Amino acid sequence: MKIELALYGSIARKAGGRHIKVLEVELPDGARVRDVLDKFGIQPEEIGLVFINAVLHDLPGLHLSLDDEVHDGDHVGIFAEDYVWPYHYRGGAPMSPKLAEYTSTHDYLRHRPRDAA
């Protein structure tokens, strides 16, 4: 199967880009996000955001998307941790069910400092 992969930030260099690299990637059927990372030598700690078909699947430090399956024709966008901007996920981006469940049950996303009442 083939996916379109877009890498942003420092991880783009692992696929021959400078700041952004978009390429078609061939993967075996049943491949997961972790297989995409492995193909380019990207460590989970290097990623910030993962989008699959414009749906947010992961946030910095969570690594919830590693076992999410990708399918033929998917567009996968992976942002390096050093290339994450708050508007990427605070503007109401659609989230995968797994990520929506996590953020609804954990105090992860904030719009104010922890000590503010």
Image (cartoon, helix red, strand yellow):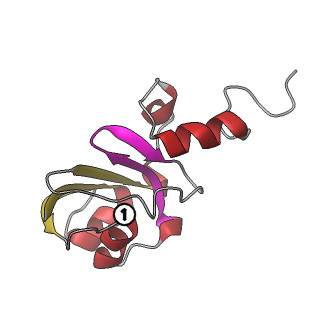
Look at 16% across and 57% down and name the residue there. 72
Residue 26, relative to residue 86: is it above or below? below
Residue 49, relative to residue 18: is it above or below? above
Secondary structure beneath label 1: helix
The front one of 6 and 71 is 71
Look at 72% across and 41% down and name the residue there. 106
Looking at the image, residue 62 sits to the left or right of residue 84; the answer is right
- The single residue placed furthest to the front in the displayed view is 30
Residue 8 horizontal/vertical position (percent): 32, 53
The front one of 50 and 27 is 27
Q: Name the residue tied to disc 1.
A: 33
Q: Would you say residue 12 sits in the magenta stretch?
A: no
How many tags in the picture? 1
The C terminus, quarter of image: top right
Residue 81 horizontal/vertical position (percent): 49, 56
The front one of 61 and 32 is 32
Q: Would you say residue 54 sits in the magenta stretch?
A: yes
- The single residue placed furthest to the top in the displayed view is 117
Figure quadrant of residue 115:
top right
Look at 44% across and 64% down and name the residue there. 67
Residue 103 horizontal/vertical position (percent): 63, 38
The N terminus, quarter of image: bottom left
Q: Residues within 10 Å of mark 1 (few under 14, many from 20)?
A: many
Look at 34% across and 59% down and name the residue there. 69
Figure quadrant of residue 42:
bottom left
Secondary structure mainly formed by the magenta segment? strand
Stretch in magenta: 46-58
Amino acid type, label 1? Val
Residue 93 horizontal/vertical position (percent): 42, 29
Residue 78, relative to residue 34: is it above or below? above
Looking at the image, residue 103 sits to the left or right of residue 89; the answer is right
